[in-house]
Amino acid sequence: MKFSTKAIHVGQEADPATGATIVPVYQTSTYTQDAVGEHKGFDYSRTINPTRLALEKQLASLEGAEFGYAFASGMAATAAVLNLLSAGDHAVVTDDLYGGTYRLFSRVLERYGLSFTYVDMSDLAAVRAAVRPNTKLFWIETPTNPLLKLIDIAGVVGIRGELATKATVVVDNTFASPYFQQPLALGADVVVHSTTKYIGGHSDVVGGVAITNDRAIADVIKFHQNAVGGVPGPHDAWLTMRGAKTLALRMRQHAENAHVVAEFLERHDEVSRVYYPGLPSHPQHELAKRQMSGYGGMVSFVLKGAQSRALDFANRLSYFSLAESLGGVESLICHPARMTHGSIPKEDRERRGVTDGLLRLSVGIEDVEDLLDDLSRALASVVPA
Ligand code: P1T
């Protein structure tokens, strides 16, 4: 089965009870047993639910994997995967990443005795230099949020191979989506998504998933899914599954529109820098061609002038809503320093390039001519630098 066929068919056989063609929303917390322990494979909905199970099978198949576990949010999925570590363990983490992931690592998990080193993982020498005897995990986000840096997944897997103890390579594949990037095929052990984004695709549901082909890792994640209980409800699972059916169609249009928008911004006098992996000016454009089958729908850029100018520009747009999140059919704009990455201390943020003039676009699948008109109008009317 190819990608879109899997999205529409895996886990989604006709309902055994009724023949319903579409997987029903099994809005039940529990299941009647014939006798103690005698049931149809379902006992309690924190542990297992048929709608959630269908979503887990669908999403695992899209990453070419055997095991998938759905969570109530991307952060809950990330937290579950970090349970692979124990007190005293160390992780190497990309220094450009979603602010909430940084917050979880630095303000929650450090208190439990884990330690994290943040490095520019687009530089493999820096990754190697950050490894310690107790390094047990590499956390890769690629393309990164919000600077769209690329990390060489196979390169990091190679460094892991040099270590005496096996460390787990985890990729947050939210920005690329499984349609454009398949980390497990490149040697990664676990893939995490915020399904809130491209997989759900319509900005109407929050969710996450952790996916792997490694049975021992799967057992740990499954154990924590049940023991900690950060699971999505059946209706959220159903919405996410419905969104994912059209992932391929949407991703193609997101990428086509984003490419046009990135080229337009790169030519514009008011813009000092554009970050998009599909542009030849992107420092890792060659890696993008190798590692991804398309460049995605996210474009970041720096507007010349002060922060107030970037905020004024964002407010002048009609079709790009000023909002956190990304990956929905509608276009969004965000000011990372004040919004998604506000939880990273200012000096850290600026050192990493998340400056006050930086804006991030989630380019939707509207008609691209309308998006360009919107951007042109706002650029023409923004307060002078
Ligand atoms: O919001 P949640 O579903 O919990 O997912 C967290 C998350 C994880 N990984 C990446 C790469 C993300 O971008 C996110 C969430 N990001 C935003 C809300 C944002 O606007 O960047």
Image (cartoon, rainbow, N blue to C red):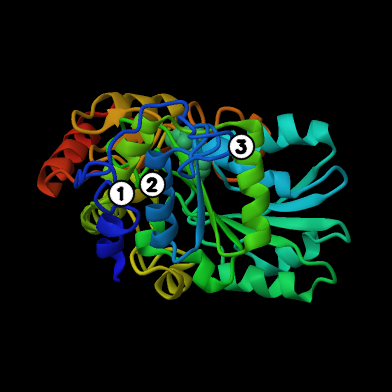
Queried on whether the Cβ of the residue with tag 3 lies below 8 angstroms from ligand 1, the answer reads no
Q: Looking at the rendering, which quadrant does residue 305 occupy?
A: top left
- The disc, 3 or 2, on the residue closer to the chain's N-terminal end is 2
Q: Residues within 10 Å of mark 1 (few under 14, many from 20)?
A: many
Whether residue 146 is visible, yes or no, is no
Question: Could you say which is closer to the camera, residue 5 or residue 276?
Answer: 5
Residue 182, placed above or below residue 343 = below
**Which secondary structure, mark 1?**
helix
Residue type beneath disc 3:
Asn
Label 1 and label 3: CA atoms lie apart by 24 Å
Residue type beneath disc 1:
Ala
Residue under the point 44% across and 75% down = 290
Q: Quadrant of the C terminus?
A: top left
Which disc number belongs to residue 244? 1
Which disc number belongs to residue 55? 2
Residue 304: x %, y % from top left: 39, 39
Q: Is residue 287 left or right of residue 298?
A: right
Q: Looking at the rendering, which quadrant does residue 313 occupy?
A: top left
Which disc number belongs to residue 188? none
- The disc, 1 or 3, on the residue closer to the chain's N-terminal end is 3
Residue 368: x %, y % from top left: 14, 48
Whether residue 29 is visible, yes or no, is yes
Q: Which residue is mark 3?
A: 226
Q: Residues within 10 Å of mark 3 (few under 14, many from 20)?
A: some
Label 1 and label 2: CA atoms lie apart by 9 Å
CB atoms of marks 1 and 2 within 8 Å = yes
Residue type beneath disc 2:
Leu
**Which secondary structure, mark 3?**
helix
Residue under the point 45% across and 43% down = 40
Question: Could you say which is closer to the camera, residue 91 or residue 24?
Answer: 24
CB atoms of marks 1 and 3 within 8 Å = no
**Which secondary structure, mark 2?**
helix
